[in-house]
Amino acid sequence: MARFRGALIGCGFFAVNQMHGWQDLAGVEIVAICDRDAERLAIVGDQFSVARRYSSAEEMFADGGFDFVDIATTVGSHRALVELAAKHRVPAICQKPFAPTLADAKAMVAAAEAAGIPLMIHENFRWQTPILAVKQVLDSGAIGTPFWGRVSFRSGFDVFSGQPYLARGKRFIIEDLGIHSLDIARFLFGDATSMTARTRRINPDIAGEDVATMLLGHENGITSIVDVSYATKLPEEPFPETFVEIDGDKGTLRLGKDYRLTVHGPEGTVESVVAPNLLLWASRPWHNIQESVALIQKHWIERLAAGREPDTSGRDNLKTFALVEAAYLSAERGGTVALADLLA
């Protein structure tokens, strides 16, 4: 029998990856799914043999019979669904971006804490194998104390074909992709105190920005640059790879194309390939992201079993979401935004 029974709300584009990840975890079973689109509900239900299918989240919660809920819907529904989970005291995972506004995100954290339930944000990019390898090098001290870093995701990949709604939002790349890169910057370099950002819209057929360059000042004195683009035409398409550069007082680290990691320090230069695993259900080039989904879900189950807070808890993710808000404020107003003002 399954040790943990889960429910999934939202059977869209990305949720199939989450269903595969749950299916791979021993002792975990998704026993109910919910979506307002009957066709998507049937497709996912049939593919993963889930008998309990709902068009109403309220009805699904009323029936109960699950130990956690995975909310894989679009951002506008997140607050209501997290508050519904809190009402029924069901631990919840919420897809990023956390919420429409920072005020909504704070309210969601408060609701979860008042109900005494764990809340994790599905911020999976920090769980990518190459990013974990970079973190391991930093923690080893191989390049000494970092003082500068860069997290870069630049691509010309057509993300709108699979997720057409992304072209319609007034906010695009920072909210959808930059949030991942900003979380990686926090993961590698620590919390930030200031943000300066500039944005551009290159593609005339979308409503939001598709290029952003962000300068972060971190609490520990590190300066980092986070740059993201879906308007960059390269001779070799790197999607969906994130590149990382870090300078330390004893050496340097570079994570480049095809997951090549170069570490230079006092003992010389070491080159390696830190490629993600190609899971049986995954497909290139998405396998890096797909593996990170499986890894963050494994982390959730381990923390749920141990009664410990997940690394990307709702309270922790407020700091990443505040960076997103600060980036938009800085780009709109010009100048630098202090993070303390947003998190107060």
Image (cartoon, rainbow, N blue to C red):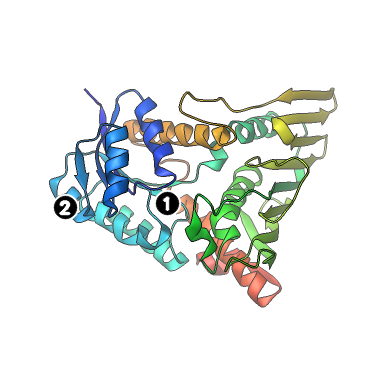
Counting from the top left corner in percent of width and height, residue 195 is at 66, 63
Rendering quarter of residue 211: bottom right
24, above or below 333, in the image: above
Q: In terms of image quadrants, where is residue 218?
A: bottom right
Q: Label 1 is placed on what type of residue?
A: Gly
Q: Which mark is residue 11?
A: none
Q: Residue at x 37, y 57 (%)?
A: 109
Q: Is residue 85 above or below residue 283?
A: below
Horizontal side, residue 178 vs residue 309: left or right: right
Residue drawn at 54 percent across, 38 percent down: 289
Q: Is residue 117 visible?
A: no
Q: Residue furthest left?
A: 63
* Image position of 28 (left or right of 104): left
Residue 263 location, quadrant: top right
How far apart are the alpha carbons under marks 2 and 1?
25 Å
**Mark whose residue sits in front, 2 or 1:** 2
Residue 7 position within the rendered picture, expressed as x and y whole percent measured from the top left: 27, 41
In the rendered image, which quarter contains the N terminus? top left
The relative height of residue 332 versus residue 285 in the rendered view (above or below) is below
x and y percentages locating residue 60 in the rendered image: 19, 48
Q: Secondary structure at mark 1?
A: helix
Q: How far across and down, in percent of the image, does residue 125 sit?
A: 55, 42
Q: Which residue is mark 1?
A: 314
User: Nearer the N terminus, badge 2 or badge 1?
Assistant: 2
Left or right of 72 on screen, residue 337: right
User: The residue tagged with tag 2: helix, strand or loop?
Assistant: helix
Does 58 appear above or below 137? below
Any mark on residue 59, and which? 2
Q: Residue at x 44, y 53 (%)?
A: 315
From the viewer's side, name the closer residue of 78 and 251: 78
Regarding residue 288, the answer to whether it shows in the image is: yes
| Kind of residue at disc 2 | Glu
